Image: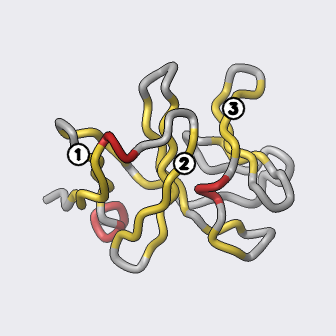
Amino acid sequence: MENWTTVCSTRDLTPNGGICAKVDDNQVAIFYCKRSDTLYGLSNFDPIGKANVMSRGIIGSLSGEPYVASPLYKQHYHLETGECLEQPELKLVKFEVRKLGEQVQVLAPLAIAS
């Protein structure tokens, strides 16, 4: 059984930017790409800067692939996989995110692990 958690309204989203939501004990950075009307969810924790800041990163594309640049040291993390472009051994945890009507929902981490 899937356990989706409503975290905000679609009106709370920042076009081409990120917001942070707490789901269980996890801070989730949610990014909204307006051009493709796509939501992405990654851990808000920057493993290099050791801080919860990823939702403040700048999103864009490199070679046509969607990335977010860490606001601290500017490493690029793939929005679909969480993999770091500059250091592939580093990876942000990916969260499933969806729009349900006017609600933005994140799949609870326990459901992801199952």
Element class at badge 1 = strand
Residue that carries the numbered disc 2 in the rendered image = 18
Three-letter amino acid code of the residue under disc 3 = Gly
Among the two numbered marks 1 and 2 on one chain, the one whose residue lies closer to the N terminus:
2
User: Percent from the top left, x then y, of residue 80?
Assistant: 55, 40
Three-letter amino acid code of the residue under disc 2 = Gly
Three-letter amino acid code of the residue under disc 1 = Gln
Among the two numbered marks 3 and 2 on one chain, the one whose residue lies closer to the N terminus:
2
CA gap, disc 1 to disc 2? 16 Å
Q: Quadrant of residue 73?
A: bottom right
* Front residue of this view, candidates 103 and 108: 103
Residue that carries the numbered disc 1 in the rendered image = 103
- Residue at figure coordinates x 63%, y 71% from the top left: 52
* Front residue of this view, candidates 10 and 90: 10
Q: Is residue 2 left or right of residue 74?
A: left
Q: Which of label 3 and label 2 is nearer to you?
A: 2
Q: Residues within 10 Å of mark 1 (few under 14, many from 20)?
A: some
Element class at badge 3 = strand
Residue that carries the numbered disc 3 in the rendered image = 60
The quadrant of the picture occupied by the N terminus is bottom left
Q: Is residue 109 left or right of residue 53?
A: left
Q: Residues within 10 Å of mark 3 (few under 14, many from 20)?
A: some
- As displayed, is residue 20 above or below residue 17? below
User: Percent from the top left, x then y, of residue 21?
Assistant: 42, 63
Q: Is residue 65 left or right of residue 1?
A: right
